[in-house]
Image (spheres, grey):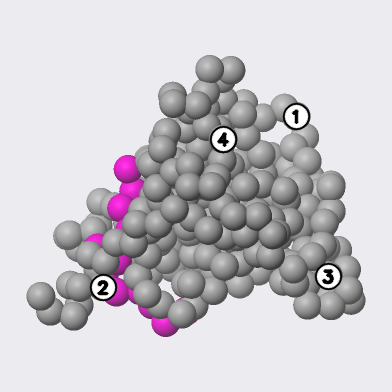
Amino acid sequence: MPATRRWAHAVLLAGLTWTFGTGCAAPRDATIVRELPAVDWLAARVDELAKVDLLRGAPPLAQARLGSLDTELRVWIRTPARRALVELRSGADGVTGEMWVFWSAPSQEEDDGMFAEYRDWIDCVDRRSGHGLGMCRPKPRQPVDWTMVEAKLKPAWKLPDQAKFAPPGEIDGQLMIVERRDGSRGEVVHWDIAVPLTSEPGRKESAMAEEIWEALWDTLSLAEPPT
């Protein structure tokens, strides 16, 4: 098999072990299929997301306590200026969700500066800092209809990894990472929205990724100040 095909079909089956020094072994509650290509910058982004989960007090996807019929979806988006997460959980009690925005914070001064910059964009509460990051929770102007958000993000459950159609770029200009789990099995895929695919195979899936991307920004806009 040619090298360009080997990385595209590389699949890592792993019970997630992101503990970041918590001193406890990660229970292997679920198998997570990562179809991400072995690229250094992408590995660094996945590491960043794990630190965000640690800072917000959320377990890694494989450790999330889900019932047999429950699902969980985490969609991360990252541009040079903005980074955000929208998380949805669906189960017997209906659909719940939350939003977070985050930034690099290697020093207190930079943390304060980025927090002020984010507050110019979005109403944000529950500020947290640690692990070289800062983050806060967007405060929507009115209660979010998470069932509607779930409907808009439904394509995220079928989105394959971009590496199936094209090699990843050298940098992540507009990166989206989707983590999804249904019962005891989950997947992690990525797309670089800045480089859409315009021919088959992959054109339809690229359009699907852009649809998810726009739905995420629409959800975050619920916390933007009125104009």
Determine which of the numbered discs, if any, sits on residue 65 in the image.
4
- Residue, disc 1: 142
| SS at circle 4 | loop
Q: Nearer the viewer, mark 1 or mark 4?
A: 4
Question: Residue 145's image quarter?
Answer: top right
- Residue, disc 2: 7
Q: Nearer the viewer, mark 1 or mark 2?
A: 2
Question: For the residue marked with disc 1, what is the amino acid?
Answer: Gln
Choose the circle earlier in sequence order: 3 or 2.
2
- Residue, disc 3: 111
Going by the image, does 169 lie left or right of 123?
Answer: left
Choose the circle earlier in sequence order: 1 or 2.
2
**Whole-percent x and y of residue 154?**
41, 36
Question: For the residue marked with disc 4, what is the amino acid?
Answer: Arg
Q: Looking at the image, can residue 225 be seen?
A: yes
| SS at circle 2 | helix
Stretch of the chain drawn in magenta: 158-173
